[in-house]
Image: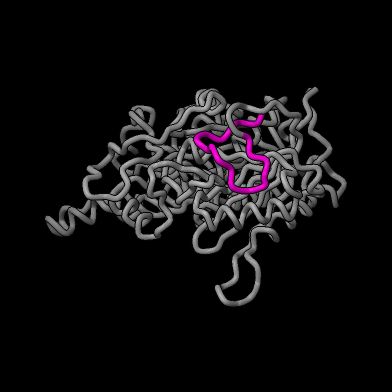
Amino acid sequence: MTSVATAVPATARRTGDARNAAVVTGMSAVTAIGVGLEEYWRNLLAGACGIRPITRFDTTGYPLRVAGEIPDFDSARVPSRLVVQTDRWTHFGLLAGELALAHAGVDPAELPEYELSVHTASGSGGNEFGQRELQALWAEGPSRVGVYQSIAWFYAATTGQLSIRHGMKGWSGVLVAEQAGGLDVVAQARRSLAQGSAVVLTGATEAALNPAAFTSQIAGGMLSPVGEYLPFDEAAGGYLPGEGGAMFVVEPAERAVARAARPYGVVAGHAATFDPAPGRGRPPGLRRAVETALADAGVAPSDVDVVFADAHGHPSADAAEARVLTEVFGPRGVPVTTTKAATGRLVAGSAALDVVTALLAMRDGVIPPMVNVRRPAFEIDLVLGRPRPAALRTALVLARGYPGFNAALVLRAAAQN
């Protein structure tokens, strides 16, 4: 029989009922260093880096030509009729959702359809599909624009397609908060359970490696000019984009126990804040998000065993995050790592992937290393070089998004009997 650790979200503690805890019972990963949970995890621990020359379009004339592109993605793993109706980010989401449900041992056909929910996050939508159809409109006229243009680009397209494919008709939706949305959607899944959902499929995938999306990111002025992603490094100059993400299955602890499912972790605490406008004289909201999420989980800073950082890679953004980590945990007070230097920054997909990675780290008692970083610039305990064995009970995941979103999520390990 499986039991859940006593650390549960504040809402569950207030009622004295650990059965209300939201637990993760299935996960997936679709990334530049591996498609599939264990392949991704194995390569991450081995120090793999998925930053490579972009092949999806001709980068001649662009100031940057590398990214975390998923090579040779097998579209045959997605139903053929949906391949032509949807964008690449939805292809990733459909596969990731399928893998997460299978990992959890959940067959939606066996459950009441209105107790099944889908909540995803998106920061870029179906931009490749949209660009292609707008090019057709410009070059050949409106008769050449496909009928699916009206929905394939939309932020909620992946949620809708997953809902249709698996017959999940409960409360569902999409959150748009750039990278922070990948954590906010986990809190949304927890709320969905509180409102009666039995199973929630949640997470985020992104595919922003096409000329329109790439140009938008270049215009933001935050991309790395050196072709390396070096968060918290003295040579940091910006981030590198990537594609992919992760999905996972969240359900009440009571239900997981009843069906003898393995809970990989408890969604224990969450907070979201927004930075004040420049010149207001108020500090950015990341520290408040961290402290509020810890309070929601009922844990102290000293209880946190690892932080999966936002790790933007731009010097000013890294300095701001390092300052918060030092203020909350003390200089070198907690191990800090990130997946982004290996996969690229996946917008909302990165935050979802960090959630999965934190759960895998707690499962196996090991913190994955950051790749490429050689000269740390701040007094924080970066995990570098090789995986670090550690007894992990509590993980903090951070995400920030343009133009001022902040999110913090606390995960607790689930005990196994």
Near-viewer residue (287 or 83)? 287
The reply to whether residue 317 is in sight is yes
Left/right placement of residue 157 relative to residue 188 reads left
Left/right placement of residue 216 relative to residue 347 reads left
State the residue at coordinates (67%, 28%): 388
**Residue 368 colored in magenta in the image:** yes
The C terminus appears in which quarter of the rendering? top right
Residue 369 percent location from the top left of the image = 59, 32
State the residue at coordinates (30%, 54%): 212
Residue 143 percent location from the top left of the image = 15, 56
Give the vertical position of 335 relative to 156 (above or below).
above
The quarter of the displayed image where residue 103 is located:
top right
Near-viewer residue (235 or 75)? 235
Residue 383 percent location from the top left of the image = 63, 35
The N terminus appears in which quarter of the rendering? top right
Near-viewer residue (289 or 17)? 289
Helix, strand or loop for the magenta stretch, by majority: loop
Left/right placement of residue 76 relative to residue 381 reads left
The reply to whether residue 118 is in sight is no
Residue span colored magenta: 366-383
**Residue 93 colored in magenta in the image:** no
Residue 24 percent location from the top left of the image = 66, 36
State the residue at coordinates (82%, 48%): 300
Query: Please, which residue is most extreme toward the right here?
Result: 16
Query: Please, which residue is most extreme toward the left here?
Result: 140
